[in-house]
Image (spheres, grey):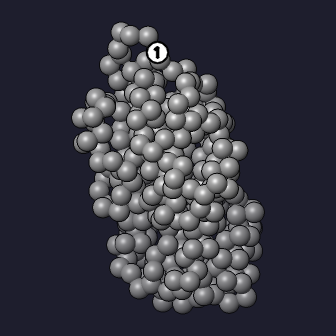
Amino acid sequence: MVKNKGVMTYNIMIVEDEPELISLYKMAIEEAGDYKVVECAMDGEEAIEKFKNTEKKIDLVVMDQRISTKKGIEVTKEILKIDPEIKVLFASADSMAKFEAKSLGVVGFLQKPFEMNRLTSVIREVLEPQKIVSEEEVAIERGQKYSLEKGYSYLIKEEKPFLAFDIFVDQVTHGFRGLCITRQHPSKVRINYGLKRTPVIWLSQTGTGDSIDPSNVSKLVHTIRNFVRDNKGSVILLDGVEYLKLQNGFVLLMKYLHMINEIIMVEGARLILPVNPKAFTESEMAFLEREMRVFGKYDIL
């Protein structure tokens, strides 16, 4: 990303084996905003070499799967070794590559054919996400019920997230800025728990402005990372992990939960994760319990 006279310009690389599509992508991308296509490659080896040797800082790679010498999945693995923070957006007709691409943490998968406005809207969403504004809730007079240490993730084992929400509300009404991510509709959450200033994100495929598609766990991770960086010492409630498992599978879910846990530790934030034990196997629960501080249904913080 380059800052030029107060304007942010994002550098993009295209990996695609059809010259006509490269030209079409480049035209659409550069007309859509402050984006510059600085590198293009038509096969896997060329893509790795150009990414490795470019003098430009690449912000996003648009990646095809069916390219020669090395497929898009293999190229993605190689460039992630060079820059673990690089954002990769797959644009491919190979639907079989979708799950593996998601397991690598790509920011999206566009199934060919697609409209160019779809490509540019995803790029804009990835590179210029809407900043989540959080304000402190009105403080309440009663003493704080629960004490959470910064840098820790808390696993709350309960069939319904009553304790988890009670802990979260207790935190945000005692000086901590919070972000609520939930399967419940935001309007119901605000009414039921009295949250007036705390941002609420809906895990839903509706595509509304206050939602995140549960199949796009990479976006969920980026959202949490950006929020805790902007709001030091904040608290996150992630309600709906059972739905995330249903949409992504347990292995992929655990990979992203591990990433979120590391973000919480590094940024000194707090994560509250309610989990219904009936939705997980005994071994799956053991994995979750290994990652976090555990509080069962009848435990007291």
Residue at 67% across, 71% down: 76
Mark 1 nearby-residue class (10 Å; few <14, some 14–19, many ≥20): few
Q: Position of residue 260 (x, y in %)?
A: 60, 46
Q: Where is residue 239 in the image (x, y as percent from the top left)?
A: 44, 45
Q: Indicate whether 166 appears above or below 51.
A: above
Question: Could you tell me which quadrant the N terminus lies in?
Answer: bottom right
Would residue 34 be seen by someone viewing this image from the given angle?
Answer: no
Question: Could you tell me which quadrant the C terminus lies in?
Answer: top right
Most foreground residue, 60 or 155? 155
Using the rendered view, name the quadrant where residue 114 is placed: bottom left
Most foreground residue, 191 or 209? 191
Q: Indicate whether 90 appears above or below 124.
A: below
Give the residue pinned by disc 1.
144
Residue at 53% across, 69% down: 89
Most foreground residue, 32 or 148? 148
Residue at 35% across, 33% down: 198
Label 1 residue SS = loop
Q: Where is residue 230 in the image (x, y as percent from the top left)?
A: 50, 35
Q: Is residue 49 left or right of residue 173?
A: right
Using the rendered view, name the quadrant where residue 119 is placed: bottom left
Using the rendered view, name the quadrant where residue 39 is placed: bottom right
Q: What residue type is labelled 1?
A: Gln
Q: Where is residue 213 in the image (x, y as percent from the top left)?
A: 41, 60
Residue at 55% across, 24% down: 300
